[in-house]
Image (cartoon, rainbow, N blue to C red):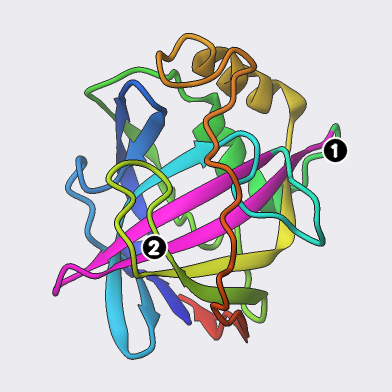
Amino acid sequence: MVLEARGGGCNRVGLESDNHTWYASFAMAGCTNLTATWHGRKYTLQQIHFHIESENMLHGHHMDMEVHMVHKSADNRSLVIGLFVQRSHIVVEENRFLDRLLELHYSSDAITSGVLENPYLGTMKTGDRFYSFLGSLTTPPCTPNLEWVLIQDILYVAPRDIQKFEHFLKTRPQADSYGHDDRPVQPLNFRPIKIGKVSAIM
């Protein structure tokens, strides 16, 4: 898998919310220069959203949060890159992109501008190993046969960032009273899980 941010990244991001969760939308901001190439097909990053707790499990355990980077190709196929997130009082500099994103106000129909961002470089690195499998969207309409790539390494963010998102979720009609917006873990049903690595981040 090759990840690319032409021009160094995107300095605009749209903010959207619905009854389920909150999105950082690059499509809404007209940003089309963030792409992932997987199995010879190029996918453009559409939006990033978050789930508490994780919708996948690592070694049989949930993580505090899971980030989904939703991509779409020119022929309307989808690729989701998933990232495990845990709260930590020590936040490494390489993950400052996630910290800034989680510190944005959870508003709707707004576009922010400022720092040039490469969400791939801020959350992954060349050589990172991942799991890949066929799955579905985890929010309605739960479209099947999506390409999923789930990064093995865990990211860490400040506890206050996750707490702010939990507080936001508690006011959403479709989230539960604990501030969760995760779909239950789905059975594999004999689907194979493959292991790969990030070939390059440009």
Q: In the rendered structure, does residue 69 fall within the stretch colored magenta?
A: yes
Helix, strand or loop status at disc 1: loop
Helix, strand or loop status at disc 2: helix
The Cα atoms of the two marked residues, 2 and 1, are separated by 27 Å
Range of residues picked out in magenta: 65-88
Q: Is residue 52 above or below residue 123?
A: above
Residue 189, how many percent across, how many down? 55, 71
Residue, disc 1? 90
Residue, disc 2? 8
Task: Report which quarter residue 3 is drawn in.
Answer: bottom left
Q: Is residue 104 above or below residue 11?
A: above
Quarter in which the C terminus is drawn: bottom left
Q: Amino acid at mark 2?
A: Gly
Q: Nearer the viewer, residue 78 or 144?
A: 144
Residue 67, how many percent across, how many down? 54, 47
Answer left or right for 148 relative to 141: right
Q: In the rendered structure, does residue 134 fall within the stretch colored magenta?
A: no
Q: Nearer the viewer, residue 97 or 157?
A: 157
Outermost residue toward the right?
Answer: 89
Q: Amino acid at mark 1?
A: Ile
The residue lying at 52 percent from left, 70 percent from top is: 149
Answer left or right for 172 relative to 31: right
Mark identifier at residue 61? none
Answer left or right for 96 relative to 3: right
The residue lying at 54 percent from left, 58 percent from top is: 82
